[in-house]
Structures are given as structure tokens and as C-alpha cells.
Image (tube, grey):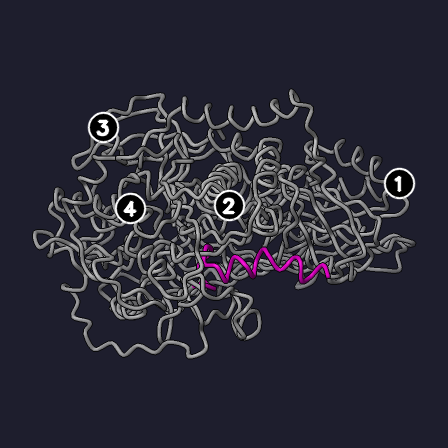
Amino acid sequence: MKYLDEFRNADLVKNGLEQLHKITQHPWVIMEICGGQTHSIMLHGLDQLLPPSIELVHGPGCPVCVTSLELVDKALAIASRPEVIFCSFGDMLRVPGSNSDLFSLRAAGCQVKIVYSPMDAVKIAQLNPDKEVVFFAIGFETTAPANAMSVIQAKALGLKNYTILVSQVTVPPAMHAILGSPDNRVQGFLAAGHVCAVMGYYQYHSIAEKYKIPIVVTGFEPLDLVNGILKTVELLENGENKVVNAYSRVVTEKGNIAAQAIINSVFQDVDRNWRGIGLIPMSGWGLRSEFSQFDAEKRFQVDDIMTRESEICLSGKVLQGLVKPNQCPAFGTLCTPENPLGATMVSSEGACSAYFRYSRVEEIIK
Amino acid sequence: MCLAVPGKIIEIFASPSAKMGKVDFGGVFREVCLEAVPEALVGQYVIVHAGFALNTLSEEEAQATLDAFRELDTLEAELGIDDGFAK
Amino acid sequence: MTSDYPLIQGPVCAVPLAHNDQIVMGHGSGGRMTQDLIRKVFQPYFSNTSLNTNNDFGVILNTGFKRLAVSTDAHIVSPIFFPGGDIGRLAICGTVNDVAMSGAKPVAITASFIIEEGFSIPDLSHIAKSMSEAALEAGVIIVAGDTKVVEKGKADGIFISTTGIGFVPDGIEIGGSYAKPGDTVIISGSLGDHGMAVLSARGDLGFETQILSDVAPLDAMIQSLVTEIKDIHVLRDPTRGGLATTLNEIAVQSNVNITVEEALLPVKPQVASICELLGFDPLYVANEGKLIVIVPANYAEKALSVVRENIYGKEAAIIGTVNSEPKSRVLLKTCIGSNRILDVMAGEMLPRIC
């Protein structure tokens, strides 16, 4: 595929890795904020090919992983209702709530539909006027325009039976939370390329300045990841804390103004509870009052939720890069992709799942 | 958090609620919302996530990135450097 | 002309109406309606000496073999008709292939149908026709069958269960536990076609593709291999769970390592594209007309050319090797030169946005 295959070219990746080995003089701890980048690194075994002194730490950029347990339980309560067709991205189906998950509800006969796009959920609402259609609107800034658009469409079509359960989160507050933590070891950041495609990277200058840390906007293909890590190490070796764009074919400094306008017309800043981390103020988006009729939390009164998280799950620490998945006592034993204790083992881009699937090679080869 | 894939716009049409288009992803076709890329034209590439075009792709920038990595190889050849990096 | 018969008004005698379009409960009752169904829908396509005796059993002649290979499977697919095939072709090919994996020539198949009330009879005829065409291609006869009808909602349209029989020639020992370090691994063609054809055909995710299912009988390919190659270790078709899951089964059974190279795996561009879009890995997507062949290295080139001579093996490729360590594990050497584990598939693959 054009714009994909070229960025998987083994020779170019090799060139980049050689350069990286050449310029790396010191140990560095670099965090990739985005779960998609974690997944790609593991899928291509890139972590095995980096200079051993570079440690990659995986961040909380997995909207599946950070959606609060309370919201997951609310989703389950709503999806259980007979009048509801509950639509969701496939990623959320196996995320464990306190007692169940969407997959099990579907197996038990509840109407749970997987969609590729929130706008497909709007179509389902049009085709089923006698049903309440609810879409689980999770995501970082990348998914916000699509989620917002679905509401704009529903309004334009005059739909009365479409609502969204919002779990939008934003990246900059999470970066502040990680970098501001006394346990922080992160020295450089790979910023999420597709978040920046929408939002640009102008917001990161102040973060780089405040914490004296280089931030490099990075894509997802092997060459993009090598490029991002290479530029980060260059900056670290030179003691520079700038923001650099290593995904320039998709990202500009200002971002996509039209997409931002779509988001701003529908969403406003709100506090968000991040599963495993806790409340981060103004770290999420919620519906503006003029769209409150599309808010599933208001449409369905689901207030009496008693959440119950696994006591041994260390997802929160993993999400902040404080613990590696294989340092968790339950990793691979009590907690596996088939029987996950927490969201980081369920989500295909959760760090625990990525480790389990791809990177136990060294232990196994021994 | 961001599985987004590049595709080529092959058709643009208006729907009652948004600017939409048909995008070709290497022989697989899908309807995509183009509301955030109002100036995009048929034949241009867009990066698509969850049925929504996030941005257009810059061919120039793509080439520049690839060239930079090709040059690393050429540079070494010119300077006669070979540090025997093994796969 | 006025009728001599009185005009009948109100309820009439409940003589069974001729149900030509839809299956009703009566079709599964074993009585006249069942016989009608068999005669009108199945017999035109399944007619053969054994079936035509109308006994409750079929008889097959054993022409002197010591060993019988048997396999059974239930077939459920949605949608029932998909690009490249349908549930009927799938049912016959699936079981023919399973039997053929032993090195046997499949000779006979039984077919049992569970049909949901309301199912279209023209569709059932179409399925029967597909089955007879597939059976003819594979050289098997349908020797026995059964039909049951369940109430609406109790079956997803139609379920077909098949059992296949073949005779294993003397001296042939092929099975999942025979892979040895040093062997070569061959795949007969492109990966992921069936799974992605069916998924696109469902239409829920809104993608248009021209991907065709690869559903096909592999008996002829296997018979050629058995004739030309003296020492075949493993034959298996990578169906549910894809290549990765099937290679894991073999690695565990044989207690060996199998390492495949990403750059050598054949995947059609459209299949690769739709997998990219949905976050699927083609190595875990179902195939219904592909063969894994594991042979000693000195037979590899010959085996490859035999497979490529078959109509369903044109894109065959050598994809990897069997090694001694790490045991019971499958590794993938990536395009950029690292190694990663290829585990068995964990649960159903779901489309993702992350």
C-alpha cells in the first residue's frame, strides 16, 4: 500500500538503526505515549534492535485501557437494557468491568454491535427508530472528530434515538501527570502522531520547556518509529529540549483546524478519571450543553454503580511507565489475554497484551 | 490509540449531514467522512481513522523522509564507513 | 360457465399446501414432506448408487486397504453465500481436506442438515448443487444424509455436518507429530482470503472488496505429493485460527520450533489492506483451501514444484524451517530482522481502532 510499504522498507530501517547505534552515547529512558506505537514496536520487534542503553517505556496512550471502570460499568448497565442497541469499537468488547464485559453480554443475548466508525452507529439509529442506539465514544484526540461528527450528523438528521457515552481523554494533561510525578524516569517523549495530525504540536512547546524534555512527534511504521527515536536521542545527546516533527507527511504544527473546529463545536474540557491513575483535572472532553440530548449518561440514569477493581492488577503503574508488564506478579499466570485482570492485558495495544503476545522471545529462547 | 491508514480519494459527494467521499485503500473501498479536509480533491491521499479523514498526506514530506534515510546509506558509502552492523 | 360446486367460504380443510419456497417444520418430520424435499431438492444433485437405495445406511467398497481415515466437522458460516463459495462448498471441501491430510484419497461423505424454519428452498437447492459440484471435483460420493428442521430462531439459517472417509495407502505415515528439525515449511498459497471474504460479505463494517474465498478441495494436490515425494512429514490445512495457530499445533505435537519469515509469506494486496484497516493479522485469519507441507529439506524444491502444478497451488512458497529450539514454539522473523513469537489465537479477532 502506498505510504505504508515504503515506511516498512528493511534497508531504510537498517540505515536508521545503524545511525542510532552510532549516535547513542548514554543510557536514555524514552516514553512512547501512544498504545499504537507500543503495538507497532512489539509487532516489529524493534525493541530488540535498539541500542541496549535505550529503554523504551510505555505510556497511557490507550483509550481502552484508561476508560474508567465506572464508565465501563455504566456501558454494561446500558447495554443490558432490552430497548438498547449498544454500539462500540471492537477494542472495548473484552475490557473487564466489575462483574462482566460487553462480549459476555452479547453472548447472553444483549444487542451489542461492533462498528468501525461512529457514523455507522448513526446509520443503525436511522434504521431502528424504535430502539435506543448508544455509541461508546472512547478515544484520544484522534477519535474525537469522528465521535463529534456522529453527534453533528444525528442532530442534522433530527434523530431522537441516538446518544453517546463519552470517554474522551486528552494527551497533554497525561504528559503533565507523568512528568510531574516524583517517580518519573522519562527523559524523552515520542508524541502520538495521529493525535498530532488533528491537534498539531503547538501545545507541547510549553511542556518541553517546563520539564526540560525533548518531544518528537512520531508515526507508527517501523521507519517512523526509528526516525522518532533517532531524533529524540539526537536531542538528548545534545542536551536540547525542543519539539521536533518526525511525522511531517501527516502532521503540521497547527494541526487540522477544520477537525479542531468540529471537536470544539461539540465538546468542552471536563475532568476525567483515568483507570488505574485517578482523576486528572481537565484531561477529557464532554458534550456541550447544546448537545446534552445526545449524552447517554443523561438519557439513562445509571448512577448506582458500585465498581470493583482487581486488587492485584497493576495496570495503573504500567500505564505510567513505573512498572513493566513482566514485573507484575500476575503477568502470564493469573493474568493473560484470555483471562485479563485489567485493561492493559485486554487491549491489543495495552502494554501487557503487547508484551505477552510479542516480546517474551528472550525468555523463551533462553 | 490511533490506527489510521492512508487511502486515495476516488469520489467526493455531499450527504445531508457532511462532506463524504469514497476512498481506495489498496483495492479495498469505503465511504469516509471528508468534513475535516474540505480542500481535498479526488486523487489526493488522506489518513483515515474510524471512517474519518484526519488530514491529507504530503507526498513531498513523505519523499523527504525517505530520502533522508536513503542518504544515510549513501553518506556511509561515500565516507567509506562500514561498521558491520549485523541484523 | 357456472360451477356445479358450491362456493366455499370460511375455513377450509387443512390439507398440506405445497410449500415450494420455504422450509417448514413438516419437512423435518420424516413423513411425506421430508421425502418430497429429498426427492425434489437433494436427489437431483446427490444421486448415486448408494444413496439411491433409499436405505438408512450407505455402503462403500473397500478395495483392499488396511486403514480407514475418518473426519467429521460441523459448518456454520454467515453469510451462507459469500464471494468464492457458499456453506455447501465449504462443508464438502472442509471434510475432504481433513481426510486428505492423512495421505488418504477421500472416497465418501455423509451430510446432515439442521435447517431453520423459514429457510428458502431455492437457497437450499443452490447449496445442494454446490455440494454436488464440490463432491464431483473431489471425487467423493455423498453416501448418506439426514435432514432436521428446527423452529425459527433455533439455528442460524442452516448448519451442515459432514463426515468423510478415505483409505490410507500402506506405508504412508503423515501427521502433526512428525515434523523434524531441518525440515522445510511450505504454504500452498496466499493467506487470509477466506476469512476476509466472509467478513467483507457480511457488510457490517462497510468495506467493499473483491476478495474471494479460497475454499477448494486439496485432495488432488495431496495425491500428487504422496505420489511424488517419498517422505512427507506433515500436511495440514490452516483453517480457523489461521497459519499461526495451525503451526503452533504442529510445533507442540512434534515438540519442535517452527520459524517462518515474514518477507516470504504470501498475502494478496487486498487482504493485506483490509487487515491493516481493521487491525487484523493475516496470519490468524481463516483459510479454506490452503495446505501446509512439511518435508525434509532435500525434498523441498520438488514438493514446491508439485504443489505449484496444481490449480490451487500457483502461489505456493517456502516460508520457513523446523528447528530444535525453542521447542513447541513458533517464531516469526520480521521484515526488519528481529524475531517475535507467533502465539495461538486468543479468542475471536475483533476489529480495533487502536
Separation of marks 1 and 4 at Cα, in angstroms:
54 Å
Q: Secondary structure at mark 2?
A: helix
* Residue at the (59%, 37%) spot, across then down: C267
Mark 1 = which residue? Answer: C298
Cα separation between marks 3 and 4? 21 Å
Q: Which mark is residue C135?
A: none
Real-space CA distance between mark 1 and mark 3, rounded to the nearest whole angstrom: 60 Å
Does C79 sit left or right of A301 as displayed?
right
The residue that disc 4 covers is A120
Along the line of sight, which residue is nearer the eye, A92 or B62?
B62
Can you identify the residue that label 2 sits on? C125
Q: Does residue A352 show up magenta in the picture?
A: yes
Q: Residue at x 28, y 57 (%)?
A: A136
Frontmost of labels 3 and 4 is: 3
* Circles 2 and 1 on the same chain: yes
Label 4 secondary element: helix
How far, Cα to Cα, is label 3 from label 2?
51 Å
The kind of residue on which mark 2 rests is: Ser
Badge 3 vs badge 2, beta-carbon distance below 8 Å: no
Residue C70 picture location, percent across and down: 74, 60
Instruction: Determine the residue located farthest toward the left in the rendered image.
Output: A290
Three-letter code for the amino acid on which mark 1 is drawn: Asn
* Chain of residue at mark 3: B
Q: Nearer the viewer, residue C322 or A80?
A: C322
